[in-house]
Image (spheres, rainbow, N blue to C red):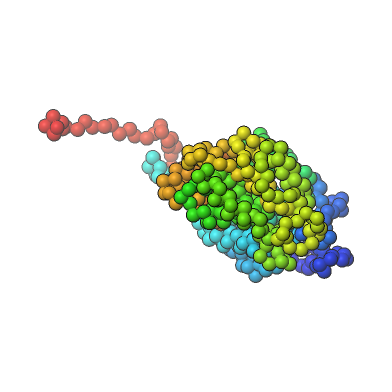
Amino acid sequence: MVHVLETGLEFIARENPNGKPSVRGYNIINGQLTSSSDEVTFESKNPALLEDCLGEFPLSTREDVHSALAAARAAFTGWAATPAPTRGQIIGNMGRLLMEYKDDLVALETREIGKTLKESGGEIQEAIDTCLFFQSEGRRLYGQTVNSELPDKELFTYRRPLGVCGIINACNFPSAVPFWKMIPAIMCGNTCVWKSPQDAPLLSFALARIMHQAGLPNGVINLVHGKGSGAGQYLVDAVDEGLVNKISFTGSTEVGKMIGEVCGRNLVSCSLELGGKNPLVVMPSADLDNAVAGAYWGAFGTAGQRCTSLGNLIVHEGIYEEFMEKFMAKVKSTRIGDSSVHKDVLYGPMLSEKYAKDFMIGLDMAKSSGATQLWGRGEITTDNQPENFMGNAGDGVFMWPHVFADVTEDMKCFHEEIFGPAVTIVKAKDFDHALHLANASPYGLSSAIYTNDRLEAYRYKTGIKAGMTGINNSTTGAEAHLPFGGVKGSGNGTRESGIWVIEAYSYWHAVNDELSGKLQLAQMDVDEIEAVEAEVDWAQLA
């Protein structure tokens, strides 16, 4: 084992077609770089260039996860006792280091999961913003002084940390989302075991090293790599074993429900940020060009691989033809390719080969639902590529943009998320019908409406069942200081980001400080105040 701050990267003797190095990655447990207990590894590949192997990483065993949990438990007492402003200062150091290494991290994220450089830059910036925001919150971890109903007694409330937090995030936002989770967790005094996304282990490894470089004590954040069905499941199983005090998970609704069941039967807190079939409504009063731009980005930005991506595009029948003409023109002009090589592409590859296979299943579901396919031909290959595809289609896993029209509420594709570059389009008769359609899916994460009618905007934001709503804006998420999360099948009501997330990583502790020197019992020893009848001649005042 080598201390995380005393070693450079180790490179694997391997020739990649782009000349970029392949790295030997490690778990980070109690500040030490460790391999898996059985020495088994897996590879991380560039989805835009599958022959490009970024590195080999430990396929963590149950023993590895339990070692990480033991390290987090051992570190908890000391970290919880560290003054919150000091914890905040370390978090601030993380933000400054992220700024220093931003360009390198952006290039790494784009190489590992295929996001465009611009999107990767925005995501790293969100991690920076999260650190800078919570640096100050270390000085505002407020409790309250409460007036007692008895004399010579003081009442106080304090925020206390939960303990050991298990952190599991998906690979589509591999830098912003784990920082959303771990930064408020450690600011509140908790320690963490972080299971990195299987398709973004190198970026996770780099981020964890930066956290330690910022002055984070050993054991406060422990990183384990592996599959969701392996290391992720071992971390969830540890709830049943009494080793975990909190699970924070971002991923599918199906897996989230399973985690919720495990946590529920153990009375352990969980934060579940799950899927979405996000609606965007376009009304006749809208600026159509602006609405087209928002719908286009919502559907196909990040290759549709965001939990906030546009799912059901709901267009008023009175403007349907005009809107669709403009929308389809943009879809057909979409530039797709590896943004590290080609400029001005809207999106790159799928996150991995696994996500590509799942997306193809989603396309089959939309077709079998009875929707009309207006555009898209599945996977991009050398013999099947759109006009504006950039590069060699055989190098990676790229998909056409897909548009399905004539979708109705009774179709399966109306209700189920298709994780990738695909949008389902629904006609609405009027505003009430549009709002009904927007609420009709089992999800409630993000939502949007394009309208210049203020009453419609008001009725939409008060009538929609969603955690987030954009007015004349796309189905994007919140900024780093606003709450992020959903309702219904999109989550369990907890929130990421902003001051609201503190509720998810702390509990309220009420303290009753008796100064009188005797036993005083609330509700029983309180002097009753008798009401005095007013001597008023109400008849004269009438």
**In the figure, 369 relative to 214: above or below?**
above
**Quadrant in which the N terminus appears:** bottom right
Q: How far across and how far down the image is residue 35, in percent? A: 83, 56
Q: Which of the 4 quarters of the picture holds residue 48?
A: bottom right
**Quadrant in which the C terminus appears:** top left
Depth order, front residue of 430/445: 430
Q: How far across and how far down the image is residue 142, in percent? A: 49, 53
Q: How far across and how far down the image is residue 98, in percent? A: 64, 65
**In the figure, 508 relative to 6: above or below?**
above
Depth order, front residue of 328/141: 328
Identity of the residue drawn at 48% across and 38% down: 432
Identity of the residue drawn at 42% across and 44% down: 153
Residue extending farthest to the top is: 539
Identity of the residue drawn at 51% across and 47% down: 319
**Could you tell whether 208 is left or right of 286 in the image?**
right
**Could you tell whether 5 is left or right of 10 in the image?**
left
Q: Is residue 301 visible to the viewer in this orientation of the structure? A: yes
Q: How far across and how far down the image is residue 83, in percent? A: 57, 58
Depth order, front residue of 96/165: 96
Identity of the residue drawn at 56% across and 44% down: 314
Q: Which of the 4 quarters of the picture holds residue 383?
A: bottom right
